[in-house]
Amino acid sequence: MQQQVIIVGGGMVGLSLALMLAKSNIAVKLLEAVKYPNYDDENLAPYHSSFDARNTALSRRSVQIYQKLGLWDALQQHATPILQVHITEQGSFGKARLVAEQEKVESFGQVIENAWLGRVLLTQVRQQPLIELIDGVQVTSLTQDADEVHIEAMRNGEYIHSLKSKLVIAADGRDSFCRQAIGVGVDEHDYDQVAIVTTVQTSKPHQQVGFERFSALGPLALLPLPGEYRRSVVWPVKKGAEAEWLGEENDQHFLDALQETYGDRAGKFEKTGKRFSYPLSQVLAHKQVVGRVVLMGNAAHTIHPVAGQGFNLCLRDADVLVRYLLEQLAKSDDIGHPDNLLAYEQARLTDQQRVIKFCDSVVRGFSNQNPLLKLIRNTGLIAFDVIPGIKPLVANYAMGLKA
């Protein structure tokens, strides 16, 4: 009998997971609150918050996942490989460098614009016969008994769907309705930061190098984009500080701040696109499995973007979940058996906790401007660059190959 799974949430994680399941011959009903545009080639940015001005640094493992799904040829058209990573701190002379060639890999990952990633994923979902996309609907009720999960959904204030399944995967974001419906609480930490996100043009070509520059204002990431002079900027700063850099009238002021923080490594910062800002916090669900419901993506864990690991972690979760579901189907027709879902949850803990603790430690560690701590950080960057054995280990974790 054809198994069917319900996914709530059609952002980047929900769409990716739906395709993973369909490629494994598992039918999916995908519920999404946003009404998607009618044409596959439209820009999704105005329609869905997942497909906005931000860019995603896909780890090597994430690229492999999309290759396995047969999506990489389409995604690669708007992706740029990261061949080197340089990590520095303003006011210190230490530098850490990772070079793909030295680590014997083609690249550490690929940077892709979220709007394009969303367009490719949505196009593939619409072409997949095993996926039924039900968009423009709000889930208003989620309950479960021993055998099934029951969902009620409405559109424009009218109930239109009453659905049931042996398994529901909730990928409905940081403020997940489904998470609340199953009674799962969260641990939340507000970093008192917002991330300023934009695209800039520099006078020097990026040469497929990614930069992370820690400063008193916040950790500034510059990532290469298609077009040799275009770079993605992600700059978490203290709440309130972003006001002076948003709006067209502040373009030059923002470029000057970038120049002062980065120096001349990228040449002159010549142009900037529109800036967007997003509040930053860490939100961790107390549980990721309750009965026949699995939390996925930001509904399970929302983390700081400092190391670009959030979406990659979510893709690894999805990839492992599908493997557990296929193993379950090989021995039973109950795809949502709670014991199997709990085994999946346990299997993902080590990777999740390592990434979450690393990102949180980096944010807290580099936010403190105590001179002694700055000296310790500077020494650490130097040690990273010269002590044998550290770079391959860090590179493998960053690429998602040691999950």
Image (tube, helix red, strand yellow):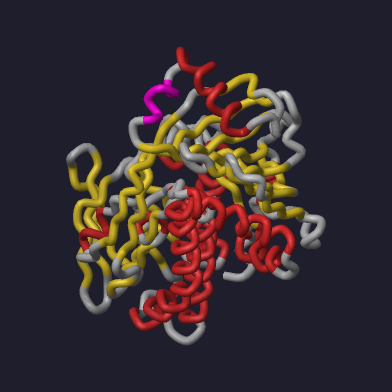
Q: Is residue 350 visible?
A: yes
**Residue drawn where x is 46% and y is 13% of the image:** 249
Residues drawn in magenta: 241-246
Q: Residue at x 50, y 54 (%)?
A: 372
Quadrant in which the C terminus is drawn: bottom right
Residue sitting nearer the eye, 213 or 162: 213
Give above or below for 368 relative to 265: below
In the displayed image of the protein, which residue is found farthest to the bottom?
331
Residue 10 in the figure: left or right of residue 103: left
The location of residue 253, given as percent across then percent down, is 50, 19
Where the N terminus falls, by quadrant?
bottom left
Q: Main secondary structure of the magenta part?
A: helix
Q: Could you tell whether 183 is left or right of 229 in the image?
A: left
Direction front: furthest residue: 372
Measuring from the top left, give residue 361's x and y in whole percent: 46, 59
Location of residue 395 by image quarter? bottom right
Q: Looking at the image, how many numbered discs can be counted on the residues?
A: 0
- Residue 87 rendering spot, x and y as whole percentages: 64, 48
Q: Residue furthest top?
A: 249
Quick check: 75 left or right of 295? right
Picture quadrant where residue 349 is located: bottom left
Compared with residue 234, is residue 181 higher up or lower down, i.e. above or below?
below
Q: Say whether residue 237 is magenta.
A: no
Return the x and y of residue 378 as percentages of the image width and height.
60, 53
Visible residue check, residue 68: no
Q: Residue at x 68, y 23 (%)?
A: 268
- Reply yes or no: does residue 244 show up in magenta: yes
